[in-house]
Amino acid sequence: MQARPARLWPRRGRHAICGRVSQQPPSGGAPAIEIHELTKRFGDFTAVDRLSFSVAPGETVALLGGNGAGKTTTISMLLGLLLPSGGSVRMLGCDMARHPHRVLHRINFSSPYVDLPRRLTVGQNLGFFARLYGIPDRRARLDELAHALDLEGIWNKRTGRLSAGQKTRVSLAKALINRPEVLLLDEPTASLDPDTADWLRSYLERYQAERHAAILLASHNMAEVERLCDRVVMLKAGRLVDEATPAALLRKYGRTNLEEVFLDIARDRRSEHLPAPPAEHSHHTEGGEL
């Protein structure tokens, strides 16, 4: 397998990972992610139930919910890993059920819970994805990623021997390799020490601002959500139960932080001024998230 290329370009700082502006045409003002009545059933169990929301270019939206809320299933349908039982998904204006190949090169995903090939080194794994995405400046891009995400010391280490925090950084490097216009992140700072997690959040803020990317983020870290996200989509038992900016949610529920709002929704402790949910929303099928 190809070893890590020698550095042929000068260091340009960690911000250089953002790279060149995409040559793809703009999407004409349409939402970068548009979900309408999205539903997924596994037999008699409904994991996602008529979910609708959108994410605009340049916006970061959090997808929040407890275990079994439908977050992973929703992201899997966005990526085309699961076919919906009903509803639709459009990414960058493209119907993902009909023409996913048209936009997959403009999208990427990171999760510390999805393993890369364990016997390959970090450099071999990232080199493979650079070729897969047809990155024209592969060697420069790999060099930028290695420096930006502090991977130089583990570049020739097998992925199966990495610590949890190292795997998180490699997964993010893989997700950024094609400079995506849509970035799906599942627990992006899981297993990172506080200093590295803080740096990564700062980097994501800069990446979104510089590239005008749409980011959908699933996280259990409420402080992270309050810092990074323009809007929050709250799920429970596969259904959308609330959607607003973090500040609006705090006002609506009379709370001082999102963790308290999250617990109120999870335990159905709502402020008395909130409208009662529709009758069809009052009974949920319990089950683990698929």
Image: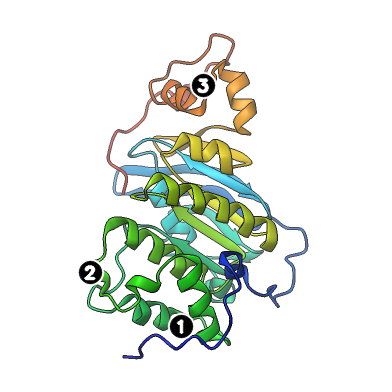
Q: Nearer the viewer, mark 3 or mark 1?
A: 1
Relative height, residue 212 to residue 227 (above, below): below
Q: Nearer the viewer, mark 1 or mark 2?
A: 2
Residue found at the very far right of the displayed protein: 28
Residue labelled with disc 2: 160
Q: Position of residue 265 (x, y in %)?
A: 45, 24
Disc on res. 132: 1
Residue 285 found in image quarter? top left
Q: Which structural element holds mark 2? A: helix
Q: Residue at x 27, y 38 (%)?
A: 287
Contact between labelled residues 1 and 3, with CB atoms less than 8 Å apart: no
Q: Which residue, given by chain and number where applicable, does mark 3 sit on?
A: 277
If you read the primary sequence from the N terminus, does the residue marked by circle 3 or circle 1 appear first? 1
Mark closest to the chain's N terminus, 1 or 2: 1
Disc 1 element: helix
User: What residue lies at 77% left-to-right and 63% top-to-bottom?
Assistant: 28
Q: Is residue 96 above or below residue 89?
A: below
